[in-house]
Amino acid sequence: MIHFVAYLAVIEALLAVWLAATCLVTLARSSWWQKRLTRSAEFGPSIRAAIADYVGGAPDFMVLEECVRASPHDVAEELLAFRQAVTGTALDRLCGLTIELTLLQRWLEEAESRDIVARRNAFRRLAFACAYEPCRRQVGERLVRALGDADREVRLTVAAAMVRTARLADLERVFHLALSETLLVRMSLGETLRPHAYLLCERVVPEVLRSGDTPRIVATLELLRAWERALPIKGLPALMGHGETEIRLGAFALAPLVAPSPEIENEVLAGLGDPDVRIVAAAARAAARLRLDRAMPVLARCARTATPPLLQTAAAALADMPPAGWTTLQELRSNPNPATAAAAGAALERARRKAGL
C-alpha cells in the first residue's frame, strides 16, 4: 500500500511538471507571436511603401535591405502579398527583389529544414519567386525534388508553381505526380492542370494509356473525366473493350467527351449487352450523353426486363434523349411490370420538370 501511494505521488509530480512546462511553452509562443505582430504592424507600412516604389521603377532598395535585416519574415510576406497585384515587368522586378535582398538563398536553406512549418513557408515563397526566370535558374531542380516531399502541402505548392511555367516537362512531372496521389489530391492537381488538358492529351496521356499499368490508367481516366471538356483521346474504343472492368468503366464515362465515331458507338452498343451490370449502366449513360438513337431499343428492353437499379438507369438515359426517348417512356408507363412503370414515370416527370414543362 505504501509503495502504491508513493507511485501515485511520483505520477502526480510528473504531471505537475508536465503541465508547468506546457504552460511555459504556451506563454513563450504567445509572447513570440505578440512580438511578431507588433513588429509587423511597425514595419509593414514602410515595407509596403518601399516595395511599391521599387516595383514602380525606383532604382533604390536600401530601405528594404534595412527591413530584411530587421524582419526578413515581414518582407517575405509583403512581397507575396504584392504577387496578385502585379504582372509583366512589374512582377519580374518584384521577384527579382528576392535575389537582390538575398531572400531567395535564405528560402533555399529553409527548404531543407526538418521543421514542417518552416519548410512549407520556404516552398510557398520559392514558388512565388519562380515566376521569374533568373529565380528559376537559381532554384534549379529543387522544386522537382520537392515533388517527392513527405508533406502533401509542400507537394501541392510545388506542383502549382511548376504548372505555372507551362513547360511540357514540368506539366508532365505534375501529371505523373497526380496519378500517384489520392483521389482528393489528384482532383486538386487536376484543376491546376486543366488549362493544359489539350497539350497533355496529345503529348503525355497516350503513353500512360498504352502502359498496361492498370492503376495508372484508371487514375488517368478519372483525371480526364474530371476535366469535363472535349479532348483528343486516342485509342478510347480499345479501352472500352479492355479486359479490366475498372478501365472499361472509366473509358465509357469518357466516351461523350471525345469526337463521335462509329467505333465508339459500336462499343457503347456492345456494352449495353454486357453480362456485367456495371458496364451496362455505364454504357446506358454514355448512350444518353451521345444521343445515340440506335441504343434506344436496347435501353427500352433494359427498362422492361432489368432489375433495379439498372432499369432506373435505362429509364434515366431515355429521359435524356427527347423526343423519342420521352415517347418510349410514355409507353413504358403502362407496362405491366410495376417497377418498370414506376421508373419510367419518375424519369419522365424529372425530365419534364428539368425542361420547365
Image: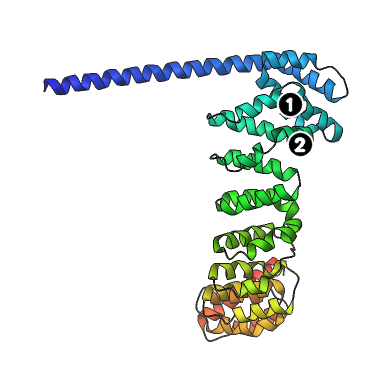
Image coloring type: rainbow
Where 138 falls versus 17 (above or below)? below
Where 259 falls versus 3 (above or below)? below
Which numbered disc, 1 or 2, marks the residue that appears first in the sequence? 1
> In terms of depth relative to the viewer, which is nearer, 328 or 333?
328
- Residue 280 visible from this viewpoint: yes
Q: How far apart are marks 1 and 2 (CA)?
A: 13 Å
Task: Name the spot of residue 294 as percent of width and height, x first.
Answer: 69, 83
Give the residue at the far right of this rendering: 57
Task: Name the spot of residue 84 as percent of width and height, x first.
Answer: 77, 34
**Residue at horizontal 84 percent and vertical 17 percent from the top:** 60
Do the residues bearing badges 1 and 2 touch, measured as CB atoms within 8 Å?
Answer: no
Label 1, secondary structure: give it.
helix
Q: In the figure, residue 225 lies in which quadrant?
A: bottom right
Q: In the figure, residue 109 lies in which quadrant?
A: top right
Answer few, some or many: residues within 10 Å of disc 2's Cα (few below 14, many 20 plus, some between 14 and 19). many
* Residue 15 located left or right of residue 33: left
Where 36 falls versus 206 (above or below)? above
Going by the numbered disc 2, the residue's amino acid type is Ala
Q: In the figure, residue 236 lies in which quadrant?
A: bottom right
Where 138 falls versus 250 (above or below)? above
Task: Name the spot of residue 52 as percent of width and height, x first.
Answer: 82, 23
The N terminus lies in quadrant: top left
Answer few, some or many: residues within 10 Å of disc 1's Cα (few below 14, many 20 plus, some between 14 and 19). many
**Residue at horizontal 31 percent and vertical 21 percent from the top:** 15
Going by the numbered disc 1, the residue's amino acid type is Leu
| Residue at which label 2 appears | 131
**Residue at horizontal 68 percent and vertical 60 percent from the top:** 205
> In terms of depth relative to the viewer, which is nearer, 312 or 92?
92
| Residue at which label 1 appears | 79
Label 2, secondary structure: give it.
loop
